[in-house]
Image (cartoon, rainbow, N blue to C red):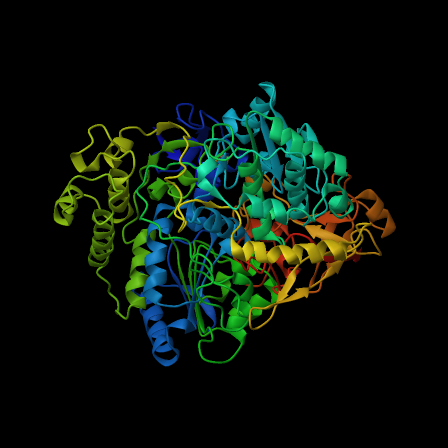
C-alpha cells in the first residue's frame, strides 16, 4: 500500500508543489510535480525529484553527537543539551555574551522553524556576533532597498509573466530556478516571455544557459555592472528618456541628484572598462525606455562584488527612471499572506565589528570578519560558535583559515543533520528531523514571489519516539542561552514566544484584527503548538487573514490545510506608497551613503583605464572601517592574470545536496571553466588538473575548456570541498571538488554592506 502526500519543495526558492508517494514504512517511492499546485502546476526539477534519496540518506544523523575523547559519538538529547549548557554557561560567565557567535546558514530561510525560532535564539544569546550567509549573498540588496524604500525586506521582483522586456544581470535563472524572484518553472516562464513577443537580455561574463536563450547577451567584464548601469542612467538623462511615470511622480525624491551622479559615466567612457560597446549600452537604455513593460533584475553577480550595494541600488534606480517600478510588467512588491511587524525606517551601521570595524546591517556583522573575531584576542573575542544549518568553512571567504580558527574554539554547537566541513569541529551536533517530518510554509519566499500565493504543507511523516522537532531544538538552545539548565520546558518557552508575538500583533494598527485582546486570540489558537501556532496567528492577522473571525472567508492555517495545493491570491498589485517606510515616506533615490560611494566608482573607472586593462576588484576596509583604496588590480586584459567568477549548477544548491548520488550522476561538477585561448596560453587542456591561485590561497581542480566564458575570465562553482578529515558525507567526499572560498580574500568587501567579494577575484592559473 502506498499513500500520496502533497508538499512544497524546500530545496530552492522556486517553491514547487510535489506529489510524493510513500510506502507503508514512510519511504518515498515516487516524486512527481503536483499538477494541481496553484503556482508550479506540475513543474519539477532534478533536485526536487531526488527528495526521496535525501530522505533516505544513510549519512543523515538520527541522534545527537557529543565529542568524547576527540571523537563525535552518539548521545541522548539530554546528554547533548547538558554538554551545551555546561560549556556555554561557563563561556558566557567568564567572557560575556559577545564571546558566543551564531552563524545562520541559507537553509534557515527554507524551513518554517528556521524563520520563526532562529531569531529568538539569536536574541537569547544577547551577542552582537550574529553572522549569516546573507553577507556572502544578497546583503547589498537588503541594504540598497533599506535606503531606497525604508525596508530591507521590501525587495521588488520582476513581474515576470506580464513583462515585455527582462534584463538579467549576474543571474542564471534557468539554472538557479530563480533567486530573490520566486517563480516555479523559470525555464518555462522565460520561454513564454519570448513566445509572447517579449525580449530577454542577459548581461553576464559567461554565456550561461539563460544567456544561450536570450535575444541579446552582453558579455560584460566581471564586477563592472555598476558602470554599465550608470551609463544606462546617463543615456536616459542625456536623451531625455527619464520618466518615472505618473504613478510614482510624487513618491520619488532625488531624481535630479541621481541624474547628476551619472554625468561622468557616459557609455563611451565606460565601454572598454565594461567590455561592452557604447552603442550596445545606449541601445539597452533606449529599449528599456521604449518598452511598455520592462524590468531590470540583478542577482548574485551584481551582489558579491566590490560595488555590490551600488549595483543593487542602480538596478532599482533604472527601474524607477524608466517608470517600471511598481507597475504591472515591471518590478513589483509582493504582498505575502502573513502579517509582518510594523517596520521602522531602515537603520544601518548602528555598530561596527570589533576588529575590522565593518558595519552592521540587518542586525548582523559581515561573515567576512568572523575569522578575525575568532583569532584576535581582546574583550569580546569569539570563543564559541553556534551554527544553525550552516557550513561557513565551505560557504564564506578564507575558508581554509576559518576552518583552522573554528577548530580552535572552546565550543562549537551545530544544529545540522550532517557531519560537514564545519560541524566536524563541533563539540555537540543536534540533528533536526527529515524534511517530510516537518510542516512547511515559505515565509521568506512568499515575500519574493512573482504572484501572491499561500501554501502550507503539513508534516507527512511523524517524528520517531524521543525525536525532537527543529523548533524544539532551537527553543531549548534559546532557553539555555538565557541561563536555564536542562531539562527545558519547551512548551513554556514556546508560550513566551507566542505571547511576544501576540502582543506585537495586537499593538499593530495594520494587523487585520478587530478584536485586540491577547487572551482571546490565544484561546482561538488553542490546539496548536510551535511554528504552526505562530503561523496561524500571522496568517489570520495578515493582509488576507480572517482577522480571527472579523473577515469571513479570510485566510487561516485551517483554510490552508483544507487547500493542500495552495491558494492563489492573485497577481502582484501596486503597493507604493503603502510599502514605503522611509522617514520621508518617499522613495529615496539618492541615499547619502550610496551617493558618497560613487566617488570610489569613479576612481575605479580611472584605474581601469581607457583600454580596459586592469580592474580593481574590491576595497580594503581597515580596523576603523575606513575605505583605504583599491585592494587589487586585476589583469583581465593584461599579463597572465585571470578573473574568477562563480557559477550555479541545476543539480546543487550552495554546499547542500552534494550527498545525493542521483543528482551528480557521476559527473564532475566542480571544474575550472576557461576560454580556449587562455587554456592554450597556459598549456592547459580539457580534464587536466590546474592550480588556481589567489591572494588568499590556492586549490587544484580539473579544467573544462569552453568558449562560453569571455577571454580573461575563469569560473568555479562554490560549495565543494567535502573531502576534509572527519566529514561524513560519503557521496560528496567521493565526488571531489575544491572549496572555492579558499580563494576568496576576506579583506575584500563591498564597504557599504560589508558583503564579501566573491566574483571578480584576481587569480593565476597554472598546470598542476
Ligand atoms: S525548482 Fe526548486 S523548488 Fe522546484 S523542484 Fe526544483 S529544487 Fe524543488
Q: Nearer the viewer, residue 444 or 493?
A: 444
Look at the image and tell me in which quarter the C terminus lies: bottom right
Q: Is residue 763 left or right of residue 373?
A: right
Does residue 39 sit above or below 497 in this rendering?
Answer: above
The x and y percentages for residue 170 are 62, 43
> How far from the left and from the top, in percent, is residue 628?
65, 68
Q: Is residue 405 above or below residue 307?
A: below
Q: Would you say residue 63 is visible in this rendering?
A: yes
Res 547 quadrant in image: top left
Q: Nearer the viewer, residue 701 or 289?
A: 289
Image location of residue 585, percent across then percent down = 39, 46
In the rendered picture of this protein, how many numbered marks are placed on residues?
0
Left or right: residue 458 versus residue 682 is left
Task: Classify the position of the N terminus by image quarter.
Answer: top left
Residue drawn at x 36%, y 56% as measured from the top left: 118
Task: State the residue in front, 627 or 66.
Answer: 627
The residue shown at (59%, 53%) is 733
Residue 578 falls in image quadrant: top left
x, y percentage for residue 343? 35, 50
In the displayed orientation, state which residue is furthest to the top: 196
Q: Residue at x 55, y 71 (%)?
A: 356
Residue located 33% across and 54% down the image = 117
Q: Is residue 308 above or below residue 17?
A: below
Choose between 653 and 149: the one closer to the eye. Answer: 149
Task: Specify whether residue 22 is in view.
Answer: no
Amino acid at each position: 500500500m502506498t499513500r500520496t502526500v502533497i508538499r512544497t519543495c524546500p530545496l530552492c526558492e522556486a517553491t514547487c508543489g510535489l506529489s510524493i508517494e510513500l510506502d507503508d514504512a514512510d519511504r518515498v517511492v515516487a516524486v512527481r510535480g503536483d499538477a494541481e499546485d496553484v503556482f508550479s502546476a506540475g513543474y519539477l526539477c532534478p533536485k526536487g525529484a531526488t527528495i526521496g534519496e535525501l530522505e533516505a540518506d544513510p549519512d543523515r544523523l538520527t541522534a545527537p553527537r557529543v565529542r568524547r575523547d576527540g571523537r563525535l559519538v552518539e548521545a541522548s538529547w539530554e546528554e547533548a543539551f547538558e554538554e551545551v549548557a555546561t560549556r556555554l554557561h561557563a563561556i558566557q560567565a567568564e567572557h560575556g555574551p559577545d564571546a558566543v557567535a551564531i552563524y545562520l546558514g541559507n537553509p534557515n530561510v527554507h524551513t518554517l522553524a528556521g524563520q520563526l525560532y532562529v531569531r529568538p535564539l539569536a536574541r537569547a544569546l544577547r551577542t552582537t556576533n550574529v553572522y549569516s550567509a546573507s553577507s556572502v549573498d544578497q546583503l547589498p540588496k537588503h541594504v540598497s532597498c533599506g535606503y531606497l524604500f525604508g525596508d530591507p525586506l521590501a525587495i521588488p521582483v520582476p513581474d515576470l509573466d506580464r513583462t515585455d522586456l527582462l534584463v538579467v544581470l549576474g543571474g542564471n535563472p534557468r539554472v538557479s530556478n530563480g533567486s530573490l524572484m520566486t517563480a516555479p518553472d523559470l525555464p518555462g516562464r522565460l520561454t513564454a516571455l519570448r513566445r509572447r513577443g517579449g525580449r530577454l537580455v542577459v548581461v553576464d561574463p559567461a554565456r550561461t544557459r539563460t544567456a544561450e536563450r536570450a535575444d541579446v547577451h552582453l558579455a560584460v567584464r566581471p564586477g563592472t555592472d555598476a558602470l554599465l548601469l550608470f551609463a544606462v542612467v546617463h543615456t536616459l538623462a542625456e536623451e531625455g528618456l527619464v520618466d518615472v511615470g505618473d504613478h510614482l511622480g510624487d513618491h520619488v525624491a532625488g531624481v535630479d541628484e541621481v541624474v547628476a551622479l551619472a554625468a561622468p559615466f557616459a557609455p563611451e567612457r565606460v565601454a572598454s572598462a565594461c567590455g561592452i560597446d557604447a552603442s550596445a549600452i545606449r541601445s539597452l537604455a533606449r529599449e528599456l525606455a521604449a518598452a511598455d513593460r520592462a524590468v531590470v533584475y540583478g542577482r548574485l553577480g551584481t551582489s558579491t562584488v566590490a560595488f555590490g550595494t551600488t549595483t543593487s541600488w542602480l538596478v532599482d534606480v533604472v527601474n524607477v527612471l524608466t517608470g517600471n517600478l511598481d507597475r504591472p510588467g515591471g518590478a513589483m512588491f509582493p504582498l505575502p499572506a502573513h502579517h509582518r511587524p510594523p517596520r521602522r525606517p531602515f537603520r544601518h551601521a548602528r555598530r561596527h565589528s570589533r576588529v575590522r570595524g565593518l558595519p552592521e546591517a540587518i542586525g548582523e556583522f559581515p561573515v567576512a570578519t568572523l575569522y578575525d573575531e575568532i583569532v584576535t584576542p581582546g574583550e569580546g573575542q569569539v570563543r564559541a560558535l553556534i551554527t544553525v544549518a550552516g557550513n561557513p568553512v565551505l560557504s564564506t571567504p578564507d575558508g581554509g583559515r576559518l576552518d583552522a580558527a573554528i577548530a580552535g574554539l572552546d565550543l562549537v554547537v551545530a544544529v545540522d543533520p550532517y557531519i560537514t566541513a564545519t560541524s566536524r569541529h563541533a563539540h555537540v551536533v543536534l540533528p533536526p528531523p527529515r524534511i517530510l517530518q516537518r510542516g512547511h510554509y515559505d515565509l521568506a519566499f512568499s515575500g519574493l514571489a512573482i504572484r501572491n500565493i499561500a501554501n502550507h504543507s503539513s508534516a507527512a511523516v511523524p517524528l520517531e519516539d524521543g525525536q525532537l522537532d527543529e523548533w524544539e531544538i532551537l527553543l531549548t538552545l534559546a532557553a539555555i542561552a538565557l541561563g536555564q539548565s536542562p531539562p527545558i520546558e519547551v512548551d513554556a518557552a514556546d508560550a513566551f514566544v507566542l505571547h511576544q508575538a501576540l502582543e506585537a500583533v495586537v499593538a499593530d494598527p495594520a494587523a487585520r484584527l478587530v478584536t485586540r485582546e491577547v487572551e482571546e486570540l490565544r484561546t482561538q489558537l488553542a490546539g496548536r503548538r510551535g511554528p504552526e501556532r505562530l503561523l496561524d496567528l500571522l496568517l489570520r492577522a495578515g493582509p488576507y487573514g480572517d482577522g480571527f473571525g472579523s473577515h469571513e472567508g479570510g485566510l487561516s492555517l485551517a483554510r490552508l490545510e483544507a487547500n493542500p495545493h495552495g491558494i492563489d491570491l492573485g497577481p502582484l498589485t501596486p503597493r507604493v506608497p503603502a510599502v514605503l517606510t522611509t522617514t520621508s515616506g518617499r522613495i529615496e533615490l539618492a541615499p547619502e551613503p550610496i551617493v558618497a560611494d560613487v566617488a570610489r566608482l569613479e576612481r575605479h573607472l580611472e584605474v581601469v583605464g581607457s583600454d580596459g586593462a586592469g580592474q580593481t576588484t574590491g576595497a580594503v576596509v581597515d580596523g576603523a572601517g575606513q575605505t583605504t583604496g583599491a585592494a587589487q588590480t586585476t589583469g583581465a586584459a593584461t599579463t597572465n592574470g585571470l578573473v574568477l567568477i562563480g557559477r550555479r549548477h541545476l543539480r546543487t544548491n550552495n554546499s547542500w545536496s552534494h550527498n545525493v548520488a542521483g543528482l551528480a550522476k557521476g559527473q564532475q561538477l566542480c571544474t575550472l571553466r576557461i576560454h580556449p585561448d587562455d587554456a592554450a596560453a597556459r598549456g592547459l587542456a580539457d580534464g587536466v588538473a590546474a592550480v588556481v591561485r589567489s591572494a588568499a590561497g590556492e586549490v587544484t581542480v580539473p579544467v573544462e575548456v569552453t568558449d562560453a566564458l569571455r577571454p580573461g575570465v575563469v569560473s568555479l562553482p562554490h560549495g565543494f570541498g567535502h573531502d576534509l578529515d572527519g566529514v561524513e558525507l560519503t557521496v560528496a567526499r567521493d565526488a571531489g571538488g575544491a572549496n572555492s572560498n579558499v580563494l576568496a580574500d576576506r579583506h575584500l568587501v563591498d564597504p557599504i554592506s560589508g558583503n564579501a567579494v566573491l566574483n571578480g577575484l584576481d587569480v593565476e592559473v597554472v598546470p598542476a
